Every structure is written in C-alpha cells, then in structure tokens.
C-alpha cells in the first residue's frame, strides 16, 4: 500500500506508475497524475511552442527577435528545431550575424557601425561613392592595432591593401600618375 501525495488516499502499488529507468514509483496515483498532466496541457496550450505550431500549419511563423508574424519563406528551415523552421527570421538572423562579425572582428557594435556610416553620409571615406545599394561597405582597420579607421567601398579598401597600407607607396603612385603623359 502507498498513499498518494495529492488525494491522500492509501492505494495498491498497481495504482501508481513505475519508472523503470529511475527504479522509482510515482508519488501520485495514476488518476491524480493524469489529472495533473491534463491541467498542465490546458494551462500551457497557449505557450510559444504550441502557438508556433498553429502558425506553421497556416504557413506562417513568429520571429522571436522582432516578434512579427511572417510567411514561412522569411525563415530558414532547420532539422534541429521540432517545428522544422528556425525561430528567428532571415532578416534578424543576418543582423545578428553582422553584429557578431563586427564585434568579433573589429570590436565595434552594429550601432557604432551605423553611426560611422551616418557620420560619413553613407559615402566611402576616400572616393565618396554611395555605400548604399550595390556598393558593399567595408570596415577599414589598421592591421597592427586593429583600430577602425572608417568605412570604405570595396575598391578603395582593396587598393589600400594592395599598397600594403603604406602612405609612401600611395604618394609614389600619385606622383607616377601625375608624371604620366596621358
């Protein structure tokens, strides 16, 4: 005989679930355990997981970052998530990835990056080409100190790299171009 912790009635051992893996008999009788499970499901059916499953059945999902409901096309698929879709939309994922890359590579936040871009009027610091649209913005930094110098277009950043970030080489190149007859 065993007494149920919920209903306080003495019952036969067969009225209690036995968990083989733990070698343990439940403290609640089967009837009370089932009632507990039923109540838990009722109170938790509106949990995020169940809402997400309901949305996915309708062809939508809710992003856990921006908290917007979007079409499933806006989410990456994933075999690691029960629902089959990531909980973060593609746009928020790319922003998180960009933030992580900026922080780990250049030790600046996404906000600092955006303020740099605003300070430069969304233009390359060297050639003043617009950095919005086709032209990708590149963070220029000193390879010795790892300090950020500014934001450049891909061509200007590559040019600096080809001149090995040495001003003497750039001055010589400028003199060469001025001396050229063409």
Image: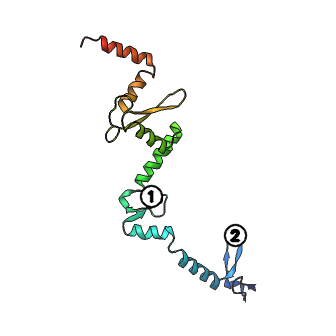
Residue at image coords 40%, 18%: 170
Q: Is residue 2 placed above or below 65 in the rendered structure? A: below
Q: Which residue is mark 2?
A: 22
**Of discs 1 and 2, which sits in the foreground?**
1
Q: Secondary structure at mark 2?
A: loop
Q: Is the image coloured rainbow, by chain, by secondary structure, or in one colour? A: rainbow
The C terminus sits in image quarter: top left
Label ID, residue 66: 1
Q: Residues within 10 Å of mark 2 (few under 14, many from 20)?
A: few
What residue appears at the point 35 percent right and 16 percent down from the top-left corner? Answer: 174
Q: Is residue 78 left or right of residue 41?
A: left
In which quarter of the view is residue 24 placed? bottom right
Do the residues under discs 1 and 2 have CB atoms within 8 angstroms? no
Residue 120 percent location from the top left of the image: 40, 36
Q: For the point 38% across and 25% down, which residue is it?
A: 159
Q: Residue furthest right?
A: 1
């Amino acid at each position: 005989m065993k007494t149920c912790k919920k209903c306080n009635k003495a019952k036969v051992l067969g009225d209690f679930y036995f968990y083989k893996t733990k070698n343990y008999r439940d403290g609640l009788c089967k009837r009370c355990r089932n009632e507990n499970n039923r109540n838990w499901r009722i109170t938790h059916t509106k949990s995020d997981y169940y809402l997400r499953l309901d949305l996915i059945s309708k062809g939508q999902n809710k992003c856990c970052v921006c908290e917007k409901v979007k079409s499933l096309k806006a989410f990456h698929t994933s075999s690691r998530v029960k629902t089959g879709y990531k909980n973060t939309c593609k746009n928020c994922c790319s922003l998180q990835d960009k933030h992580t890359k900026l922080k780990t590579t250049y030790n600046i936040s996404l906000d600092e990056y955006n303020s740099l871009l605003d300070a430069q009027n969304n233009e390359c610091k060297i050639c003043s080409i617009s950095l919005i649209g086709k032209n990708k913005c590149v963070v220029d930094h000193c390879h010795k100190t790892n300090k950020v110098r500014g934001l450049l277009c891909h061509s200007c950043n590559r040019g600096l790299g080809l001149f090995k970030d040495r001003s003497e080489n750039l001055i010589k190149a400028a003199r060469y171009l001025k001396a050229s007859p063409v």
